[in-house]
């Protein structure tokens, strides 16, 4: 750290506790930035180490800045709202092309992307699938991901005669786009998140999120109009949200387009601009950024053009 120009730490994690302790006593470097990737104001129980790290960061014992997902009551001045980046300009362009002619047709194409476990909500996804079948809503559900609980979920689906479900297992990140291109909805009833990148990646392709009202998910979906968030265990609410879109396809179309319009906020170009702005505001440091070419600016909001560019670390 003594030889670094800046330090970046990702929390919450066990190794982060050591990093925060070192930053408490270290004089160098001056610029120190901690990203808290979890839920900044959780409603329920959480690991004790997470709570310790949040209290430490809120009190600014590390003497730097913190970036979080969402905006929160009583957010200290050194805590900044930031979006998680996950989209290149090429991916944003591919998403726009795929979404241009997308319409809500039946059977519905449902998608889940993530680790196959209860925390991510796979059991709740299957319950929503069962509820849709009971309401005679035709669908195909594709689950991308894997985990030790996969056989249990497959057995549950078989026991309930859910035949329109495919467990694809792990899929390379570069292949997820073709699933997003075909999907109408992405289901994400997770117990705990910051902001899941799979949602912004799906939104870029015009996929409408139906997610749990956890952390920043309800904030961002409401602000963008790109989808719906329901209480975590509200299977009826999650199902009703999908059925409402089926009965009102114009609302689905509007949400789909809103997701595509919002997706550049989660692109790397927007993130680079936000990082440059953070260093400027927090430490008065102007990061060197080459002038972006017209090709790299395709699909980026005009307000970002003046500050876009590659951040030199």
Image (tube, rainbow, N blue to C red):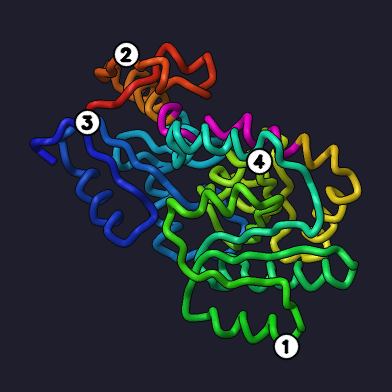
For label 4, count other residues whose C-alpha is less than 10 Å away and answer few (under 14), some (14-19) or many (20+).
many
For label 1, count other residues whose C-alpha is less than 10 Å away and answer few (under 14), some (14-19) or many (20+).
few
Quarter in which the C terminus is drawn: top left
What secondary structure is the stretch in magenta mostly built from? helix
* Structural distance between the alpha carbons of marks 1 and 3: 53 Å
**Magenta-colored span:** 255-270
Report the mark closest to the observer, 1 or 3.
Answer: 1
Marks 2 and 3 in Cβ contact (< 8 Å): no
Locate residue 236, reporting x and y percent.
83, 64
What SS does tag 4 mark? loop
- 63 vs 151, nearest the viewer: 151
What SS does tag 2 mark? loop
Marks 3 and 4 in Cβ contact (< 8 Å): no
> According to the image, label 1 marks what residue?
159
For residue 168, what is the image quadrant? Answer: bottom right
Report the mark closest to the observer, 2 or 3.
Answer: 2
In the displayed structure image, the side of residue 313 where residue 217 appears, left or right: right
In the displayed structure image, the side of residue 25 where residue 141 appears, left or right: right
Of callouts 4 and 1, the N-terminal one = 1
Quarter in which the N terminus is drawn: top left
> According to the image, label 3 marks what residue?
313
């Amino acid at each position: 750290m003594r030889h670094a120009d800046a330090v970046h730490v990702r929390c919450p994690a066990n190794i982060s506790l050591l990093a925060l302790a070192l930053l408490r006593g270290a004089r160098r470097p001056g610029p120190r930035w901690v990203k808290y990737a979890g839920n900044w104001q959780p409603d329920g129980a959480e690991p004790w180490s997470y709570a310790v790290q949040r209290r430490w960061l809120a009190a600014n014992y590390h003497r730097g800045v913190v970036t979080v997902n969402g905006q929160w009551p009583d957010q200290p001045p050194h805590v900044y709202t930031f979006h998680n980046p996950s989209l290149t300009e090429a991916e944003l362009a591919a998403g726009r092309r795929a979404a241009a002619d997308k319409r809500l047709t039946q059977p519905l194409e449902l998608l889940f992307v993530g680790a196959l476990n209860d925390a991510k909500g796979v059991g709740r996804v299957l319950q929503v699938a069962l509820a849709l079948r009971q309401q005679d809503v035709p669908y195909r559900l594709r689950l991308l991901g894997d985990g030790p609980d996969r056989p249990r979920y497959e057995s549950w689906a078989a026991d309930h005669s859910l035949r329109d479900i495919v467990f694809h297992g792990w899929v390379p990140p570069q292949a997820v786009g073709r699933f997003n291109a075909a999907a109408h909805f992405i289901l994400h009833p997770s117990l705990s998140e910051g902001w899941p990148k799979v949602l912004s990646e799906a939104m870029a392709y015009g996929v409408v999120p139906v997610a749990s009202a956890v952390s920043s998910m309800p904030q961002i979906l409401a602000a963008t109009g790109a989808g719906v968030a329901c209480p975590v265990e509200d299977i009826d609410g999650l199902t009703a949200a999908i059925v409402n879109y089926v009965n009102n396809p114009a609302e689905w179309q509007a949400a789909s387009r809103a997701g595509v319009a919002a997706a550049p906020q989660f692109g790397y170009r927007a993130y680079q601009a936000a990082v440059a702005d953070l260093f400027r505001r927090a430490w008065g440091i102007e990061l060197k950024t080459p002038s972006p070419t017209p090709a790299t600016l395709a699909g980026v909001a005009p307000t970002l053009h003046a500050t876009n560019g590659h951040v030199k670390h």
